[in-house]
Image (cartoon, rainbow, N blue to C red):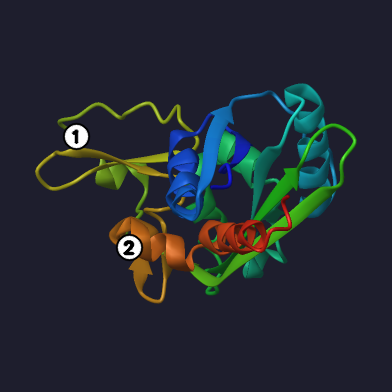
Amino acid sequence: MAAPHQVNFITGNANKLSEVRAILEPAGIVVSNQALDLPEIQGSLEDVTREKCRVAADLVKGPVLVEDTCLCFNALNGLPGPYIKWFMKSIGHVGLNNLLAAYEDKSAQAVATFGFCKGPGQEVLLFQGRTDPLFLDTLSFPPVSLYVPHEKKTPQLHDLYSCVIYDEAFTLTIKPGWDAVFEYEGETYAEMDKAKKNNISHRGKALDKIRQWIESGAMN
């Protein structure tokens, strides 16, 4: 029996790791993870991903998988694009909502680009998935003052990958990434079960390409 393929996914984000394992491990791919501080150069999403993967392979001395995500608002001519992480860190989910407030077009394209490298000095392969169109669901994400009851203190939104929401019963929930604020075909990512989300999301589509590539024997 052939030994399972192994790959080190470079992330400190538990939600991303869970989604990667859910798609790759049923195909016999063992996914470990490691958090590294990798450089993010200025350039296209492909350039950024390729450089991060190259550096990660040099540090880990083995096969690595990295991911970069791009969010392109049509009304903003593709911004913030590959710099979505820095937009989120600076202005958060509410800021994204406000950026589009003056535009009728709330649509966006989400792109996930994974880079895989077998080890130091090896070629970096890219796998890309897209979800288009996504729509900013402003009804599900009003300004903070509207969805945090006055009886509660405003939570610290310290996690740039999370959206903190109180429901009518004052029950606190935390939704990862854009899950609570973007919808696809009338349903937000947060409303979907994990299997459905992984089937249609930009990350899920990219990971499916990786799974098919590995199962073809190309990784050997």
Residue 39 in view of the camera: no
Mark sitting earlier along the chain (1/2): 2
Q: Where is mark 1, residue-wise?
A: 150
- Check disc 1 and report its element: helix, strand or loop: loop
Q: Position of residue 34 (x, y in %)?
A: 59, 26
Q: Position of residue 163 (x, y in %)?
A: 38, 42
Q: Is residue 142 above or below residue 7?
A: below
Q: Is residue 193 above or below residue 219?
A: below
- Residue farthest toward the left in the current orientation of the protein: 169
Residue 22 in view of the camera: yes
Q: Give the left or right position of residue 102, taking residue 117 as reference.
A: left
Q: Is residue 84 above or below residue 132?
A: above
Dot 2 surroundings within 10 Å: few (below 14), some, or many (20 or more)? Answer: few
Q: Residue at x 50, y 49 (%)?
A: 28
Q: Which amino acid, by three-letter code, is at mark 1?
A: His
Dot 1 surroundings within 10 Å: few (below 14), some, or many (20 or more)? Answer: few
Near-viewer residue (85 or 113): 113
Query: Which picture quadrant has residue 183?
Result: bottom left
Near-viewer residue (37 or 140): 37
Q: Position of residue 38 (x, y in %)?
A: 73, 28
Q: Give the left or right position of residue 105, taking residue 65 as reference.
A: left
Q: Are marks 1 and 2 in contact (CB under 8 Å)?
A: no
Label disc, if present, on residue 139 of the rendered structure: 2
- Check disc 2 and report its element: helix, strand or loop: loop
Q: Residue at x 62, y 63 (%)?
A: 209
Q: Residue at x 12, y 48 (%)?
A: 168
Near-viewer residue (7 or 54): 7
Q: Give the left or right position of residue 153, taking residue 156 as reference.
A: left
Q: Give the left or right position of residue 66, taking residue 201 as reference.
A: right
- Residue farthest toward the front in the current orientation of the protein: 1
Q: How many marks?
A: 2
